[in-house]
Image: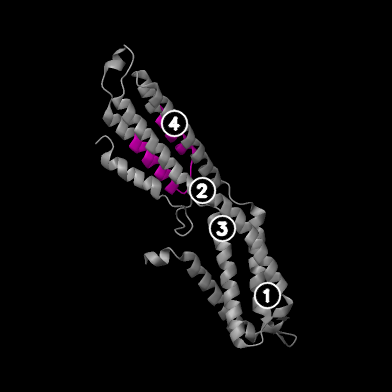
Amino acid sequence: MKLLSRRTIIIKSIIAAVLILVVKNFVFKHLSLYGQDFHDLIELSDITIIFTGAFFVFGLLLAATMSDFKESEKIPGEVASNLEAIKDWIYLALRAPRTGTSDLCKEELNKAFLREELLSITRGIISWIYSHEKDSNIIFPLIRRSNEIAYYFAERGVDKEAIKGIQENTNAMRKQMTRAYYISRNNFIKPAYILLKSILVIVVVLLLISKFKTPSADYFVTFSMTFLFCYLYMLVSGLDDPFDVTNGEIDIDLKPIDRFEQRITNDFLV
């Protein structure tokens, strides 16, 4: 069952190809126009240039979406690295000598508070990525909470390098999540999707009314072309939002953040 859920594009494409094949051979072959059978209106050799052009257009749009996807693949690892760095700066703050003479500078740092803050930030980022809405009113205040750790240290005379390091990693993480937000929210231009859908419909219609030399060529070409174009369309649509984790096949790998969350749950200031 899990294997099938990870192969939804292939399954949908096969179903579409079989459906078109059935419609052509069991519906169109019984229809005619002025004595001309619907499934023999056009010679396949007359329209091969259309298929070539269609593949070219799909290739261009696929390359455009792939560039965003490749950039998105880096974001989980970079966010996890920044969170890991913040964790290391917290360890430094706990061990380095402290300055200042105020009462806050003399009290012991609250390890339970620091652990809970970092855990909450990490789990919040993971929940936001897994969410459907990708609400900016959630993620940016959440990232800002890591600066609260820096403020907490500043009030208690913690080493300035630790405070500076936390702020730098927070700013880097904010840039990464801002990029993730805009990739997720700004879909590919609408006219491009209209073009893709138009090409897909034209290709399917041409396959339905094309004449082939042999029945075996009819079955093979109709099935193959329908499968390929449906697959390409769903692939471009999926790559357009790599942070849509409901699409199990084309979402980005969140293991770096998930594994970091597991590590700090098990060993961070336990």
Q: Residue furthest top?
A: 101
Amino acid identity at mark 3 = Ser
Residue at 36% across, 18% down = 155
* Secondary structure beneath label 3: helix
Distance from label 2 to label 3 (Cα)?
A: 15 Å
Distance from label 2 to label 1 (Cα)?
A: 37 Å
Residue at 31% across, 12% down = 102
* Secondary structure beneath label 2: helix
Which residue corresponds to mark 1?
206
Which residue corresponds to mark 2?
72
In the displayed structure, does residue 238 sit left or right of residue 156?
Answer: right
Query: Between disc 2 and disc 4, whose residue precedes?
Result: 2
Tell which of 127 and 46 is nearer to you: 46
Distance from label 2 to label 4 (Cα)?
A: 22 Å
Query: Between disc 1 and disc 3, whose residue precedes?
Result: 1
Distance from label 4 to label 3 (Cα)?
A: 32 Å
Amino acid identity at mark 4 = Arg
Q: Residue 32: give x, y in percent of width and height.
A: 69, 85
State the quadrant of the C terminus: top left
Q: Is residue 17 magenta?
A: no
Distance from label 1 to label 3 (Cα)?
A: 23 Å
Classified by dominant secondary structure, the portion drawn in magenta counts as: helix
Query: Between disc 2 and disc 1, whose residue precedes?
Result: 2
The magenta segment is 118-147
- The circle drawn on residue 144 is 4
Q: Residue 7: give x, y in percent of width and height.
A: 45, 65
In the displayed structure, does residue 114 sit left or right of residue 234?
Answer: left
Which residue corresponds to mark 3?
237
Q: Residue 100: give x, y in percent of width and height.
A: 33, 13
